[in-house]
Image (cartoon, rainbow, N blue to C red):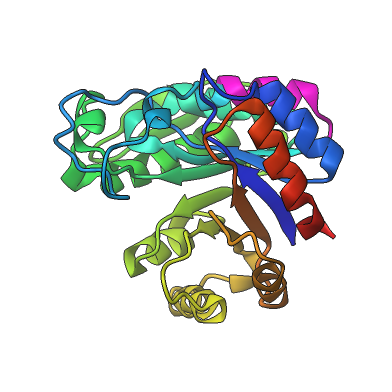
């Protein structure tokens, strides 16, 4: 099982290059970064975690720029979005960013995706909350066409373009792994329809084997080979017993949280996590 981390790549925290090199030096397997293009000041949409929205949400670097710097500074570290907000992104531009990063990193990119929660944020991109998942599906299918076809076209209800040429193609074939965040049955249906894996967050009272079996049941019902699906647990417990349980349950990756602290404090957190890699 891979053990990695996720970190909001903020402009006031540890430099992403230093974080990536320190992770690789300590033997961590992966680094994922979340995305928010901006945060509307209206704050009409409440923070799902409750209370005030943390500062880091409005201070993040672009994920593809940040991960490109991390890729250039490392050799083995897996690099991913955790998550990329697809309803807020043009699919042609995003497909090129994904393919470019995957090729330049030597096939080390993982495409974690999601629909998002901030209504005002997505509205500023011309997306609507109630149709965001339909838009996400069509944009992902469009990107798959761009990555895998010499002359790609897509025509859906919400996304449409005639044949285009677009290179580079991703280093990984047919494309980088696509992991979908979320915990509902609707999420699981989307995973087995057009993704390569699941990116859940542990919930209170969560049993990892039960959750794994939920995905397997959904895959079986829809004719998808469960063995082809990857499970990466976002914000996994930083506890040896829990990680051992994940590993024994066949979970492929666990991501530990890097807190929103100073550079020196973050390096201490990495040192504290290091025994969990053994």
Q: Quadrant of the N terminus?
A: bottom right
Q: Quadrant of the C terminus?
A: bottom right
Q: In this view, does 210 lie above or below 202?
A: below
Q: Which of 108 and 195 is in front in this view?
A: 108
Region of the chain picked out in magenta, as a range: 65-76
Residue 98 % position (x, y): 57, 30
Residue 272 % position (x, y): 73, 49
Q: Is residue 21 toward the left or the right of residue 160 in the image?
A: right
In percent of the image, x 28 and y 49: which residue is there?
Answer: 48
Q: Which of 168 and 43 is in front in this view?
A: 43
In percent of the image, x 55 and y 75: which residue is there?
Answer: 208
The quadrant where residue 9 appears: top right
Residue 10 % position (x, y): 51, 24
In percent of the image, x 39 and y 31: which residue is there?
Answer: 57
The quadrant where residue 41 appears: top left
Q: Is residue 8 visible?
A: yes
Residue 71 painted magenta: yes
Q: Nearer the viewer, residue 209 or 275?
A: 275
The quadrant where residue 230 appears: bottom right
């Amino acid at each position: 099982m891979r053990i990695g981390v996720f970190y909001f790549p903020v402009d006031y925290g540890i430099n992403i290059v230093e974080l990536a090199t320190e992770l690789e030096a300590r033997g961590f397997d992966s680094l994922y970064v979340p995305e928010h293009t901006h945060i509307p000041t209206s704050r009409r949409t409440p923070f799902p975690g409750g209370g005030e929205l943390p500062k880091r949400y409005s201070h993040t670097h672009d994920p593809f720029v940040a991960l490109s710097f991390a890729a250039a500074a490392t050799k083995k570290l897996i690099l991913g979005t955790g998550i990329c907000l697809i309803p807020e992104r043009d699919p042609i531009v995003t497909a090129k960013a994904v393919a470019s990063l995957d090729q330049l990193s030597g096939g080390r990119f993982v495409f974690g995706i999601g629909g998002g929660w901030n209504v005002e944020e997505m509205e500023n991109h011309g997306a609507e909350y109630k149709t965001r998942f339909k838009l996400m599906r069509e944009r992902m299918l469009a990107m798959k066409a761009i990555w895998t076809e010499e002359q790609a076209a897509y025509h859906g209800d919400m996304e449409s373009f005639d044949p285009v040429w677009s290179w580079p193609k991703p280093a990984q074939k047919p494309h980088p792994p696509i992991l979908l965040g979320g915990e509902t049955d609707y999420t699981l249906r989307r995973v087995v329809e057009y993704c390569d894996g699941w990116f859940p967050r542990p919930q209170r009272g969560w049993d990892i084997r039960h959750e794994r079996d939920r995905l397997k049941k959904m895959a079986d019902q829809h004719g998808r080979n469960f063995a082809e699906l990857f499970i990466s647990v976002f914000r996994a417990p930083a506890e040896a017993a829990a990680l051992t349980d994940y590993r024994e349950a066949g979970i492929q990756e666990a991501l530990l949280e890097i807190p929103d602290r100073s550079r020196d404090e973050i390096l201490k957190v990495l040192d504290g996590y290091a025994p969990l890699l053994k």
